[in-house]
Every structure is written in C-alpha cells, then in structure tokens.
Amino acid sequence: MLAKDITRKFNTSSHTFPDAPQEERENLQLFAFLCMLSFDVYVKRMLIEKIIDAKLTKKTEEKGKKSVKENRKNK
C-alpha cells in the first residue's frame, strides 16, 4: 500500500511542469515529488498529535473526576 502510494506520487510529479526546459523540469518534478511526500508526513504528524492530545485530555479529565469523588468520600 505504501509502495503504491509513493509510486502514484512519483508518477504524478513526473507529469508536472511539461512546458519547462528539460534541466529545470527534472528539478521541478523532483521538488514536486518531495513536496507531496512532505505533505503526507505533515498530515500524519498532525493526526498523531491530535490523537495523543485527546488521549491525554481524557486521562486528565478522568483523574479530575476521581479526585472529586475521593474528596467527597473523605468529607
């Protein structure tokens, strides 16, 4: 699945900048390919951060609820 995605991105980038001169086209196509790969990394990083933040928030809320219950029991 990952190999197919990378191949698809490479093929897409190889069809960009058709009107550019050959030397520039190769560099621009490589840049386009790298940008596509970088965007995936950026999106995955954001997703990972959101999942971790949600998990930490949930744990914090659960600890807060437990503390309130314990305080009520101790009174």
Image (cartoon, grey):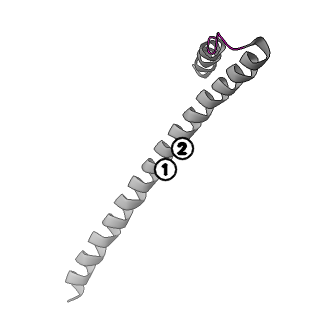
Give the x, y percent position of residue 31. 68, 27
Say left or right for 12 vs 21.
left
Residue under circle 1?
49
Task: Specify whether residue 19 is painted magenta.
Answer: yes
Q: Quadrant of residue 22?
A: top right
Check disc 1 and give the amino acid type. Glu
Give the x, y percent position of residue 27. 75, 23
Task: Specify whether residue 73 is painted magenta.
Answer: no
Say left or right for 55 vs 72.
right
Q: Residue at x 65, y 10 (%)?
A: 19
- Say which element carries label 2: helix
Compared with residue 61, is residue 47 higher up or lower down, i.e. above or below? above
| On-image quarter of the C terminus | bottom left
Q: Are marks 1 and 2 in contact (CB under 8 Å)?
A: yes
| On-image quarter of the N terminus | top right
- What label does residue 38 carry, if any? none
Q: Within 10 Å of the Cα at label 1, are there few (<14), some (14-19), or many (20+) other Cα atoms?
A: few
Gap in angstroms between the C-alphas marked 1 and 2? 6 Å
Which residues, given as a range, are shown in magenta?
15-20
Q: Residue at x 67, y 29 (%)?
A: 34
Q: Nearer the viewer, residue 54 or 14?
A: 14
**Most extreme residue toward the right, as rendered?**
23
Compared with residue 13, is residue 38 higher up or lower down, i.e. above or below? below
Compared with residue 5, is residue 69 higher up or lower down, i.e. above or below? below
Give the x, y percent position of residue 70. 27, 79
Q: Nearer the viewer, residue 72 or 41?
A: 41
Check disc 2 and give the amino acid type. Arg
Residue under circle 2?
45
Q: Residue at x 62, y 11 (%)?
A: 15
